[in-house]
Image (cartoon, rainbow, N blue to C red):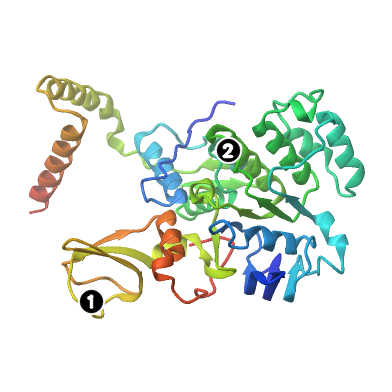
């Protein structure tokens, strides 16, 4: 069965496994890749896929439920109940295209992945700080 | 809360003159997936053999699912135990092996067994299976009993990483299906780190660290800073391991508050690092059992 979301784990990230699942669901909600009514994979499916403790998956889903993002329906599974996608979602395609152009010019200028990440996060930090000030 | 599926009090086992385990007191939380860690010879296999009544304690007591495994062997039908090396009858076919398990286990559940046993041809002789397939078959045999407690002794020892991952997936799938409590003995932390939510570290025949994994990781920090005479550090309750290298000092600590001194770099600790620090013979702390924690759902 094809799922709306597939989880992946980074064991070296230092982030607790259940939090990684919570974050991945939230990110997908923010990007609009999953939407209200979509079914999350069942605990057993995630467990069999990632070889992790079922308690961990259940805990992640309970956290999401407490935040009102999903609802568990007895015997049927866990479904997305609300979205985090901002109203600006419709601008994403255009913004992504501009970003891709920028990434291309960064690569042409010889920046590797790490330098690109560093430049983006530093610029983002400074720009946010300026806006707050 | 349900009673603990495995409790030991002052448990000791002596082999001739040597104590394999001594003064072991332990209570495993219901529904936990427990990593039983420790160097070779720490007493992991001895503990599992005592839990299944294969050995009798020299002193103290052990109870599984609230019963004494020696006096009340009926409890064994509710325990799934896979000893080291997953011993099976090599001349049996896979189907014969399953049939044998069905006939000898009153609580056998065909549906669970069939569902879990995938990608192994039932006509194959057990002797012709790969190590990984044999390990999976042995695990299906115990999961098919719908056990309340699963005890595995070094299940990954002879498996390559891929077969190990497949075995772990099968185990977790089985746990999701049966809600069993699991104890996995392993001397390789990386094998169990992914799944266990509770850790019992044995060293020198006793428990040297026990607790909920998330809480243990939360309460330990690695401090790095310039070398200095070490007094009390604010926020540190206990220093587990101290290491000097040149001008640098590294401390693995139990913290009870924020580290305010800015000359320390504070980092989280991985489970492997934590267990190694408690195992390290250079500076073995006194046996301690951290505060009782709200169990099954950690954090």
Of B212 and B242, nearer the camera is B242
Q: Residues within 10 Å of mark 1 (few under 14, many from 20)?
A: few
Q: Residues within 10 Å of mark 2 (few under 14, many from 20)?
A: many
Parent chain of label 1? B
Of B31 and B231, nearer the camera is B231
* Mark nearer the N terminus (1 vs 2): 2
Q: Is residue B105 above or below residue B295?
A: above
Q: Residue at x 52, y 49 (%)?
A: B188
Residue B228 pos. (x, y %): 17, 72
Which quadrant of the view contains residue A99? Answer: top left
Residue B134 pos. (x, y %): 71, 34
Residue B84 pos. (x, y %): 68, 47
Residue A17: image tag:
none
Q: Residue at x 18, y 24 (%)?
A: A103
- Which residue bears the numbered disc 1? B230
Residue B92 pos. (x, y %): 85, 31
Q: Is residue B85 above or below residue B94?
A: below
SS label for mark 2 = helix
Q: Nearer the viewer, mark 1 or mark 2?
A: 1
Residue B164: image tag:
2
Indicate the quadrant containing the N terminus of chain A: top left, top right, bottom left or bottom right. Answer: top right
- Asked whether the beta carbons under mark 1 and mark 2 sit within 8 Å of each other, the answer is no
Q: Give the spatial CA distance, label 1 vs label 2.
A: 43 Å
Q: Residue at x 52, y 64 (%)?
A: B212
């Amino acid at each position: 069965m094809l799922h709306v979301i597939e989880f992946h784990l980074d064991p070296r990230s230092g982030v607790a496994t259940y939090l990684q699942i919570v974050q991945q669901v939230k990110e997908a909600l923010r990007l609009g890749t999953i939407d209200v009514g979509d079914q999350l994979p069942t605990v057993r499916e995630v467990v069999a896929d990632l070889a992790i403790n079922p308690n961990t998956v259940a805990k992640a889903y309970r956290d999401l439920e407490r935040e009102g993002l999903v609802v568990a329906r007895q015997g049927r599974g866990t479904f997305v109940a609300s979205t985090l996608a901002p109203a600006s979602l419709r601008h994403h395609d255009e913004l992504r295209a501009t970003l891709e152009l920028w990434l291309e010019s960064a690569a042409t200028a010889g920046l590797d992945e790490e330098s690109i990440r560093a430049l983006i996060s530093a610029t983002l930090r400074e720009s946010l700080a300026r806006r707050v000030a | 809360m349900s009673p603990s599926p495995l409790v030991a009090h002052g448990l000791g086992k002596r082999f001739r003159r040597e104590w394999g385990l001594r003064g072991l007191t332990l209570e495993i939380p219901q529904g936990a997936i427990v990593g039983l860690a420790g160097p070779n010879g720490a007493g992991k296999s001895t503990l599992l053999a005592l839990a299944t009544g294969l050995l009798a304690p020299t002193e103290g007591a052990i109870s599984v699912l609230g019963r004494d495994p020696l006096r009340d062997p009926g409890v064994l039908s509710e325990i799934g135990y896979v000893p080291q090396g997953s011993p099976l009858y090599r001349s049996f076919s896979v189907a014969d092996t399953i049939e044998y398990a069905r006939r000898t286990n009153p609580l056998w559940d065909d549906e669970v067994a069939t569902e879990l046993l995938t990608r192994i041809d039932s006509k194959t002789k057990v002797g012709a299976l790969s190590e990984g397939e044999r390990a999976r078959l042995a695990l299906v045999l115990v999961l098919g009993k719908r056990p309340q407690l699963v005890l595995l002794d070094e299940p990954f020892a002879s498996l390559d990483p891929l077969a190990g991952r497949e075995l772990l997936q099968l185990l977790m799938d089985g746990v999701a299906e049966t809600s069993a409590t699991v104890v996995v003995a392993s001397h390789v932390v990386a094998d169990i780190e992914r799944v266990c939510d509770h850790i019992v570290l044995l060293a020198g025949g006793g428990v040297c660290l026990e607790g909920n994994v998330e809480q243990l990781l939360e309460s330990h920090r690695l401090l790095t800073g310039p070398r200095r005479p070490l007094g009390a550090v604010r926020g540190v309750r206990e220093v587990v391991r101290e290491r000097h290298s040149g001008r640098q000092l590294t401390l693995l600590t139990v913290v009870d508050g924020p580290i305010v001194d800015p000359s320390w770099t504070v980092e989280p600790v991985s489970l492997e690092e934590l267990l190694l620090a408690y195992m390290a013979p250079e500076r073995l702390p006194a046996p301690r059992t951290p505060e009782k924690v709200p169990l099954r759902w950690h954090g």
